[in-house]
Image: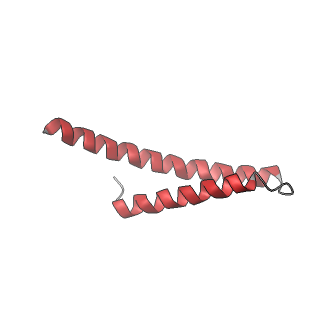
Amino acid sequence: MANQYGTKVWAKWASNSLGFALTLLEKPNLPWDERLSHSEAAIKSLNIVKAELEEVNNVIHHKTKAQ
């Protein structure tokens, strides 16, 4: 499992990446392939955060069952 600091960094980066991708949708002069590139980067970072959150959830679930 990633450490807590690393997860927070990825979450912040994913949030920024998503915000940037959404902002690019409003740029009428920006080529669509560039918008797509930023959108795909946001998806990748969000998937990393999702995987880490699922891992945290599994740890919590196992500790809850152990009690």
Where is residue 25 drawn, in percent x and y?
75, 51
Does 46 sit left or right of 59 as displayed? right
- Image mark count: 0
Name the residue: 43% across, 45% down. Answer: 51
Question: Who is closer to the viewer here, 22 or 53?
Answer: 22
Colouring scheme, one of rainbow, by chain, secondary structure, one colour: secondary structure
Q: Is residue 20 above or below residue 53?
A: below
The residue sitting at the left extreme is 67
Does 63 sit left or right of 10 as displayed? left
The residue sitting at the top extreme is 65
The residue sitting at the right extreme is 29
Name the residue: 35% across, 60% down. Answer: 4
Q: Quadrant of residue 66?
A: top left
Where is residue 49 drawn, in percent x and y?
46, 50
Q: Is residue 33 above or below residue 8?
A: above
Q: Quadrant of residue 16?
A: bottom right
Where is residue 13 drawn, in percent x and y?
53, 60
Name the residue: 83% across, 57% down. Answer: 30
Q: Quadrant of residue 6?
A: bottom left
